[in-house]
Image (cartoon, rainbow, N blue to C red):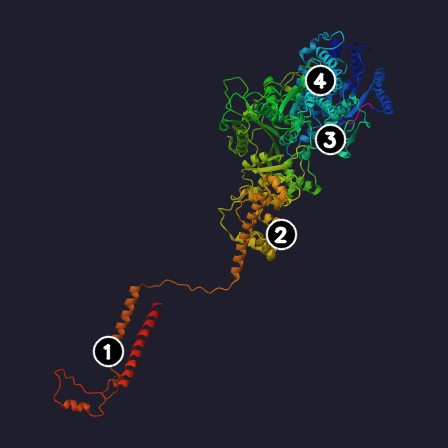
Amino acid sequence: MRKKVDERIRTLIENGVRQRQRSMFVIVGDKSRDQIVNLNYMLSKSRVKSRPSVLWCYRDKLEISSHKKKRAKQIKKLMQRGLMDPEKADPFSLFLETSDITYCLYRDSERVLGNTFGMCILQDFEALTPNLLARTIETVEGGGLIILLLRSLSSLTSLYTMVMDVHERFRTESHTQAAARFNERFLLSIASCKACVVMDDELNILPISSHMKFIPPVTNNEDSEGLSKRERELKDIKDQLREDFPVGPLIAKCCTLDQGNAVINFLDSILDKSLRNTVALLAARGRGKSAALGLAIAGAIAAGYSNIFVTAPSPENLKTLFDFVCKGINALEYKEHLHYDVVKSSDPELKKATIQINVYKQHRQTIQYLKPHDHGKLSQVELLVIDEAAAIPLPIVKSMLGPYLVFLSSTVNGYEGTGRSLSLKLLQQLESQSHSSAQSNGSNSSRLFKKIELNESIRYASGDPIETWLNDLLCLDLANSIPNISRLPHPKECDLYYVNRDTLFSYHKESEIFLQRMMALYVASHYKNSPNDLQLMADAPAHHLFVLLGPVDESKNQLPDILCVIQVCLEGQISRKSALKSLSEGRSPSGDQIPWKFCEQFQDNVFPSLSGARIVRIAVHPSALRLGYGSAAVDLLTRYYEGQMTLFADDDEETEEPEVKITEAVEKASLLEENIKPRANLPPLLVHLRERRPEKLHYLGVSFGLTQELFRFWRKHNFYPFYVGQISSAVTGEHTCMVLKPLNSDDIEVSESNKCGFLDPFYQDFRQRFRRLLGTSFRHLNFKLAMSVLASKIDYSNHEPSDYDSNASSKLLRDVLSPHDMKRLEAYSNNLVDYHLILDLVPILAHQYFSEKLPVSLHGAQAAVLFCMGLQDKDVGAVKEELGIEREQVLSNFIKTMKKLYSYLHNIAGKEIEATLPRLKEIEMLPLNKSMDEDLAEAAKEVEEKRRAADEAPVDPKFLQKYAIDDGDNEIEKALKSAKVSASGVISIKSNKTKADKKEKHKETGKSKRKGTDGGRSESKKKRS
C-alpha cells in the first residue's frame, strides 16, 4: 500500500542539502529498517552529485547479512515467517546491492575516523556510548543523514529504564543497580534539536517537540556558481596564489578558508627562515588541522629544510598528517620512489604507521617521527611539529621547545577528549614571553609567537545544528563555559556540597548550566577527557559528586561559583569468597580498582571486604589554582566520611534517599500522543553534607599518574602509597600510583603509635619492595620523586642511639662487610684510593642506610648522591646530569657521605671489640650504717670498760715480776739503814743493769704498746662494719 510521506521529512532533508548541514532521524519500531530505503531515495533526489555512501554500524549481528548469497537466504526465510513484506523486500535488497555501504562493528569504530559518508545508520541502541555516538556522527558530511534505529517501544520514556550494555561495566559486587540518567537526558535533548525528527516505522512524526509542527523550506544563499560567501573567498585566494611556488599548489589542496589562511601563516614562518617562530594551531575535531600541518611540512621540504621532526602521542595519530605531506609534495611535482621514499613501522602494534619520509630530489631531507619521551635525542633540528600537544605532558612539551621553528597543534575540544592545560598554561606563557622579549631585546633576537584558530568544519557548513546538539549533549565545546569567579573566598569559608545526580542530569535549564560548568572544570584540569566520562558520572551506581562552593547568598537567585569538583567512587565490601576466587584464578573483575589491586599486591583476602572510597577526579577552577581549595575539599571530604560533619546519631535508623519514579514524570500515553518534558518534583540539586548521612568507610584512596606535584599534594593529606606500577604509560610516561588514607573506624583495632593505622605493615612492605626495584624498573624515575615515595629518614640529629641500631650495624659488619671491605672504606675515606675501588660496597651501604639501619645524618645533596649511585645504579656522569651539579661536586658529596658512614661503622666495630676485652672487677663502696659520732662514742665506751675491768682485776704476780728490784748486793737494806729517807717514803738505789739492757727493754715496751693500739683499731673496724 502506497502512502504519502510527510512533507516535513522531505523539507528537512532538502534544507540540509542546501545549507550543507546534517539532519537526524530517530525511527522507533521493529520495521524501522524498511524506511532506510525511502530516506536514502529522498536524499539522493535532493543531491546533485552521486548517491550517498552509507556507514552502517551495529553491535555484533546484522539482521540482513552483508554477504550477497547469505542475504538472499535470510530474506527468503524472513518472507516465509511473515517478518518481511515481499513488496518491500525487493527495494531493500536493491538498496543493499546498489549502495556503497561500509559495515562497521561498534568495537571497530576507530577505523572509520577520518572517512566521510553521506548517511550513517546506527542500530542496537543498547550498545551505543557517548564516544561511539560522537565518533560515528562526525563522519557524516554536510547535507547527510544520521538514522538511529530503535526497537519497538510502548513509550519513549521506557528509554529511561533501558539497560545499556555499558552498565555491565559499571556494576560491582556491592553496587548493582545502574540508572539510565544519560538516556533520559539524551531523549530530552533530541526533543530540543531543531534538525532532528522522531518518527515511528511508518514515517509518522511523533509530537515530542513543538518545533516539529512546521518546518519551513530555506532559500539558497549561493551565488551563480553555487558557492557560498566563504567558498567564494577561498576560490579568490587560490586564484591569486596559483602561480606562486610553493604556496599556490599547496593552497589548492585546502578545503576551507580557515585552513587556507592557516597554511599561508605556516608558510610565512617557513620562508622567513629565521627559525625563531612558534606557531600554535588550535581547533575542534574535523577542522583539518592535521591536513594543514601536513601541507606546511611539504612547503618546508620545498623551501630546503633538511631535518624535520614530527611528534605525537602515537604515530597512528599522524596518519592524516603524513598523508597530506605526501599529497603536498606530489602537488609540488615530487614522485614517490624517484624523489622520496615512505618508511613504515615494522612494529605490529603500530599497524604499519608511517614513521619517516626521506626526500632526495635537491639534497637529503628527512621527515622523522620521534616519540615524545625521546625529546633528548633532538639534534640539528630546523623544524619541529608537535601534533596533539595537549595529550603530551606539559613538562615534556616545554622541554621540546628550542632555538628552531616550532609548530604546535592541539584539539581544544572533541570526541576523543583532551585538556585545555596546553592553551591555558603553555600558550599564555609563550605569548607573554614573546611580548616581554620583544620589548626588552628588540624584534631581531626575540622569539615570535603566533596563534591560529580553525572554526570552519571541513565536512559541513558552520552553524550545523547537529554539531551544536552533540556539543551540548556531550559537553564538548566548553571553551566559554568556565565563568569568571566574582570573588575568591578564604578556603575556610567554603563548604562541600553533595550533588544530586537525578537533578543534575534532568535537562532543566539551571541543571544544564551547572553540569556544563562542572565538566568545564574537568576539561580544564585534566589532559585527557572522554565523553564516556559523562555517562560514567550519570549512570554508575557507585559514583558520587561533590562540589566546593563559597558562602552562598540565598537572597540572590543565581548559581554559585564552583571552586572545586570531586568525583568519588565507593569500593570494597567484596565477599571473602570472591577475594579467594580472584586470588586463585589470578585475575581481577572490573570495578573496585583499589581493593583488587591491594588484594593482588599483598595476596590479602581481608582488605577487599573493607569499604572505602576512591577519589576518581578532583578539579579546581583555573582561576583558583594553588590557593588551597583542593586541600580544603579533601579535608572536608575526609571529615565527612569520618562522621565529623553530620548531625545523625549512630542509633538513628538509616533513611534511604527517596527515589524519583520515572513513570510519574510523563503521562501514560501512546507514542503518537506522548509529551516529553523534564521531570518535575525533583530533589534539590545541592545538599549540604550536614544533611546527608555518610557511608561507613574504612579508607579513602586515589589512583593517579605519579608526578612530584601530585604526590606531594596527596602525602600532605596523609595518604600513603601502596602501589606504583612498574610500566609507565605510553601516552604520559607516568607510572600509576595508588595511595590510601585510613579513616578513624571502630571496626579495626590499631595501635595508637602507628601513624598510618592498619596500613602500616603493608606500607613498610611496599617501601621495601620499591627500594629493591629502584635499580631496575624505577631506575629512570626522577630521584626527587623516588626519594619522596621511599620517604626514608636522613636527619638523625635528634636521634637517640639504641641497642637495635647497634645490633643491626653489628650484624651488617659480621654478615655483609668483611674486614677487607672496611679497610677499603678506610683507604677511600683517607683519600688514598679512587672511588672505583668501593663501588661494589655503595649499593650495600645505600640499601642499609635508606632502610634506616644506619642512623647517620646526611644533608640533601649527600643523600641524593648516595640514592642515585647506590639504589638507582647510576654512574657519576648520570648523577651529574640529574642533580645539575659539576662532577667534582658529585665526588665531593660522595666522599663526605662515605666518611660519615665509615666513621659510624668504625665506632660500632670499636665498641664491639672493646666489649670482648677482660676488665678488673669493680669494688662496690656501700655507705656506713652508723654516723662517725656514734662510732667514736661506742669505741670510747669500750676502752673505758676495759680500763675499769683492768683496775678491778687482781694483779698477776708474773706481771709484777718485771718491776722487781735486783737485790743481789743487798742495796735495799743498805738504803733503809741509812738515815736519808724522804717524807714520802721513797728511797733511791743504784741499778746494776747496763745501758744495753735498758734499751732492749724499752724496745719491747714500745712494741707491746703498738700492738695494743693496732688491735684496738682493728677491733673497732670490725665493730663498725
The image position of residue 958, as x and y in percent, is: 27, 85
Identify the disc placed on residue 368: 3
Between residue 760 and residue 390, name the one nearer to us: 390
C-alpha distance separating marks 1 and 3: 132 Å
Badge count: 4
Q: Amino acid at mark 4?
A: Gly
Dot 4 corresponds to which residue?
Answer: 260
Compared to residue 627, the image places residue 958 above or below, namely below
Which is nearer the N-term, disc 4 or disc 1? 4
User: What secondary structure do most residues of the magenta stretch adopt?
Assistant: loop
Q: Amino acid at mark 3?
A: Gln
Q: Nearer the viewer, mark 1 or mark 2?
A: 2
Which is nearer the N-term, disc 2 or disc 3? 3
Compared to residue 592, the image places residue 102 above or below, namely above
Q: Farthest bottom residue? A: 969
C-alpha distance separating marks 3 and 4: 25 Å
Identify the disc placed on residue 314: none
Dot 2 corresponds to which residue?
Answer: 837
Q: Nearer the viewer, mark 2 or mark 4?
A: 2
Dot 1 corresponds to which residue?
Answer: 952
Q: Is residue 60 magenta?
A: yes
Which is nearer the N-term, disc 1 or disc 3? 3
Between residue 489 and residue 781, name the one nearer to us: 781
Which is nearer the N-term, disc 1 or disc 2? 2
Q: Which residues are drawn in magenta? A: 58-64
